[in-house]
């Protein structure tokens, strides 16, 4: 089999996997896509379709990262990865905001304690200074 024939065979198998994904036969599609990726770890389209065939957003994210590893300019993968990671980014922003409020509350509490201790010390000094 020539290189060109092998390339056509890979494309045919990719099309078969795409059809399986569209028919909601994801387990079968994953197997075909895994085989294609094992043969060529840089098969961009196989990684892209694998991101659709997998069961979780984490797995999809890994597949999309691989698409971008192979082709950093793949806008479809970059957009999909961004949409997957929006909740993570929002959670990180909320966490950062809550940490800021916690740190401000702790700082305020210690400032209040120092002020109260200063007041107590001043009061005792006035009482015992007489």
Image (spheres, helix red, strand yellow):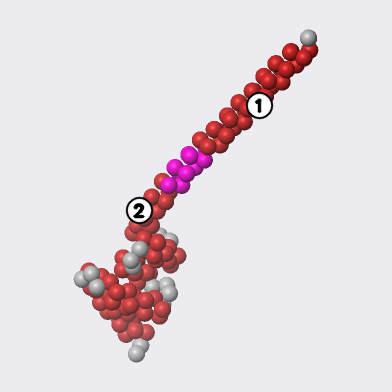
All told, the count of numbered labels is: 2
75 displayed left or right of 12: right
Can residue 71 be seen by looking at this rendering?
no
82 or 45: nearer the viewer: 82
**Residue 128 in picture, x, y percent from top left:** 77, 14
The residue indicated by pointer 2 is 83
Given the current orientation, which residue lies at the most extreme right position? 129
22 displayed left or right of 123: left
Can residue 129 be seen by looking at this rendering?
yes
98 or 41: nearer the viewer: 98
The residue indicated by pointer 1 is 114
Q: Which mark is residue 106?
A: none
26 displayed left or right of 37: left
Range shown magenta:
91-100
Q: Tell me which label, 1 or 2, sits earlier in the chain.
A: 2
Q: Does 98 lie within the magenta span?
A: yes
Disc 1 secondary structure class = helix
Placement of 108 over or under 14, stated as above or below: above
Placement of 87 over or under 53, stated as above or below: above
**Residue 114 in picture, x, y percent from top left:** 66, 26
- Which residue is at a point 67% across and 24% down the rendered structure image? 117
Q: Does 26 lie within the magenta span?
A: no
**Residue 64 in picture, x, y percent from top left:** 39, 63
21 displayed left or right of 114: left
Question: Based on the displayed image, in which of its 4 quarters is residue 84 positioned?
Answer: bottom left
25 or 109: nearer the viewer: 109
Disc 2 secondary structure class = helix
- Which residue is at a point 62% across and 31% down the rendered structure image? 110
**Residue 16 in picture, x, y percent from top left:** 25, 77
Near mark 1 (Cα within 10 A), the count class, few <14, some 14-19 or many ≥20, is few
Given the current orientation, which residue lies at the most extreme top position? 130
130 or 28: nearer the viewer: 130
């Amino acid at each position: 089999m020539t290189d060109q024939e092998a390339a056509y065979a890979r494309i045919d198998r990719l099309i078969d996997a795409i059809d399986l994904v569209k028919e909601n036969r994801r387990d079968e599609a994953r197997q075909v896509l895994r085989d294609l990726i094992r043969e060529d770890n840089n098969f961009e389209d196989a990684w892209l379709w694998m991101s659709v065939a997998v069961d979780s957003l984490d797995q999809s994210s890994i597949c999309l990262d691989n698409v971008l590893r192979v082709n950093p300019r793949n806008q479809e993968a970059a957009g999909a990865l961004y949409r997957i990671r929006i909740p993570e980014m929002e959670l990180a922003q909320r966490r950062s905001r809550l940490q800021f409020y916690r740190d401000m509350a702790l700082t305020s509490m210690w400032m209040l304690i120092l002020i109260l201790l200063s007041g107590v010390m001043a009061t005792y000094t006035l009482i015992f200074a007489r």
